[in-house]
Image (cartoon, rainbow, N blue to C red):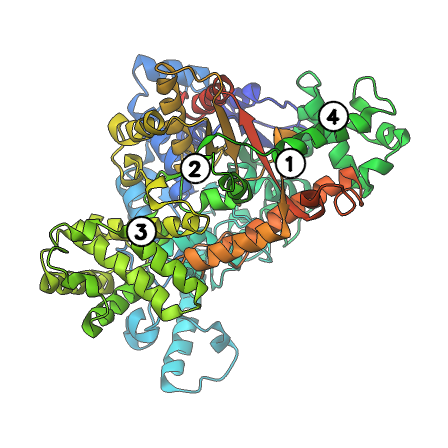
Amino acid sequence: MKINFTKVEEAFFAEAKSQTITTKVPYITTESFPKLGLLSALSFLEWASKNPNGVVSLPTGKTAQYFLDFTHLILENWTNKKGKDFLEKYGLADVKKPDLSELSFVQMGEFFPIDPKQHNSLHNYAQKQYIEAFGFNKEKALLINSEEVELAEGKHFSEIFPDYKIDLSLRYREAKTHQEQLQQESIFKIDNWCTAYENKIREKGGIGFFLGGIGPDGLIAFNTRGSDHFSSTRLTQTNFETQAITAADLGGIEVSKNRLVITIGLGTLSFNPQNKAIIYAAGEAIADTIKASLESEPTVTYPATALQKLENARFYLTEGAAVSLEDSIDCYYTCTPWNHQKTERAVIELCKKINKFGTKLELDDLKADKYCSMIPDLNENTVQSVIDSILAKLHKGMKKEVNQVYYHTGPHHDDIMLGIMPSTNRQSRDASNELHFSVLTSGFTAVTNSFLYQLLIDTKDLINQGTIEMINFPDFFKDGYKYKWDKDIYHYLDNIAAQDEEEKRRGVCHRVVRALVSIWNIKDEEELRETIFEVLTILRKSYDGGKNPPKVQKLKGMIREFEEELVWAHYGIMVKNVHHLRLGFYSGESNYEKDILPILEDFRRYKPTVISLAMDPQGSGPDTHYKVLQAIARAVEDWSKEEDLSKLRIVGYRNVWFKYNPWDVEVIVPVSLNSLATLDKSFTECYITQVNASFPSYQLDGKFSDLTQRVWFEQHKQIQLLLGKNFFYQNDSPLLRATHGVIYHRELNVQQFLEEASNLGKAMENIL
């Protein structure tokens, strides 16, 4: 199809791996999320230079950071040599530096109601990042400020909706109380406000430049799956996927599932037929949504298909986000030389496409398939070669290992469990193996204020009842609190066995007291009570999703650390073998001493023969998993200068956020039904802050252990389809007969690992 790319787009498209576009909307791929931000920034500035009085709607969220950073960087260097060279490279050498002050900014959405001064308010974000930092004219801007939306009798939203819940059924039913009458009248006033907001956008000629992300259900702005393609600005509910994504901003899904939003509509975006509407997306997790949005006919199932009517619509994608597109799959097979990995993928995916067991595939099936027909020297033994290589990976995952020192790492608490727990359990059964579990961040963001508040109330009550007896020991507040931390663990585990919920809770409260004394340097019982009161007061005054003071963050983190110790103590791992490194970057204090040295010192101390880590693909930015991977790589590299690491193995795993394919990995681990039950029981009993899934995956409204089981089971079905229906349940191996799930993971030597980490680092960081 003929595509009228701009000069910036032409420059980036020339660098893309795939040069073929067959989708309904043109797209451009980049190798990393930072470069995606660069492309977005340059396109915006290119448009702004031609439309100095135009109407723009720009993203208001964490994924916009690279766009913001590069926009500032380019503007600041526009006239110097570095900037000029850069502009010439991307087709802007003759473009006048844009003046952003006369652009009209349109806020695309906002939670409602919300205090606009809160840091998690999108109005607050727009005010700081665009009105102040970009210098947009506030008089021309259209912002969504909850405090300026008129409600019944001129009352504040906290009076009309005291619990911040809005019942939209009042649009259609009779109000039964005076409060409901006020709420009903207010809802209609909000609707009128939204209509007026829409009219103001249209009076400006509509949006001329739109840049926004896309949600897992295909969401654009807050237009979730099912949104009318002609919809306008409105007050509306969200769906589970959106609630899960926004839970981190609002302080948990308990909040986000009850919070409505005001959003511009899909019709708002298409009102101006010349709208340069850009959707950007990063990471393999969003790949299926991108495929449906770009390759489907217009449908309310995927809101982004509404943009097909706009001739200037574009998708800017990382290679990971584009990986499921037919164009990308074609390039996977044709843009580089053929190898056995491609043969594995072609055959395994053919089994799924035609729903036929690998053992039943015939040569004609392969010849009739677009990709299998490309296999060099295709013959009757081709399928068997794939079965043999997959069996070799499976047997590697069954091998019993002895005399090993394992150093398992997780970016967050529960990452190791949800990634490779069946493997670690088998490793722990041999006494010659030494196991260490190291969580590299404090994880405080996963503990809600409401959870901590109730836990402190319970702790205070137990102190009042005299059942936290250790505080009565004469040396407890001096240094006694430092000892017997493992006693809290075994008290809790004993009461899992006893099925005594009250005593389990007392075990947690014991740990909370030790943590409080440690963090606040408490000297006696009276000071302990005062500190508990102080923290309760802080939590009461905090809004959901607000940033806690450092000491409260540390307390939350120590609760997560207690949970991690509980998990591995289930399997006989001593507390001293569970390490909490609390790397500095997680709290904004990144440097060698705080990020690299703690890992390196553990390597020196324990001398592992196997190191495991979360090894994710291109993500949605330099997130925690990426930063942890790079920190471990740097520590391994420095350790290699001191020790011979030729026999060190690096295990790369993924969990619920990203998934491997069987052709990506060197090892396939069988998972028994017993292992699945153990996973769920351990998760439920030990990760007490996570059982209610306050920050769930958008893929499942439930515990992460349930989602993990689903992933492992689906992977088992994938392997079973290749190996044959009877392979597992009629196998000579008891382990394989009991298998109902499988795990895929990498196994690399040091050189291979450092090369992969380096390549990922270059893609993420070497942009300018």
Which image quadrant for residue 396? top right
Q: Residue at x 45, y 63 (%)?
A: 497
Q: Earlier in the sequence, mark 3 or mark 1?
A: 1
Indicate which disc residue 343 carries. Answer: 4
Q: Earlier in the sequence, mark 4 or mark 1?
A: 1
Inspect the image, locate mark 2, and give the three-letter code of the amino acid beneath it: Leu
Query: Label 3, label 1: how many angstroms apart (C-alpha)?
Result: 48 Å
- Please tell me whether mark 3 or mark 1 is closer to you in this view: 3
Inspect the image, locate mark 3, and give the three-letter code of the amino acid beneath it: Asp
Q: Secondary structure at mark 4?
A: helix
Query: Label 4, label 1: how many angstroms apart (C-alpha)?
Result: 18 Å
| Dot 3 alpha-carbon crowd within 10 angstroms: few under 14, some 14 to 19, many 20 or more | some
Q: Residue at x 40, y 67 (%)?
A: 190
**Residue 692: % across, % down:** 44, 62
Q: In the rendered image, which residue does mark 1 sit on?
A: 324
Indicate which disc residue 435 carries. Answer: 2
Which image quadrant for residue 406? top left
Inspect the image, locate mark 1, and give the three-letter code of the amino acid beneath it: Ser
Q: Earlier in the sequence, mark 1 or mark 2?
A: 1
Which image quadrant for residue 361? top right
Inspect the image, locate mark 4, and give the three-letter code of the amino acid beneath it: Thr
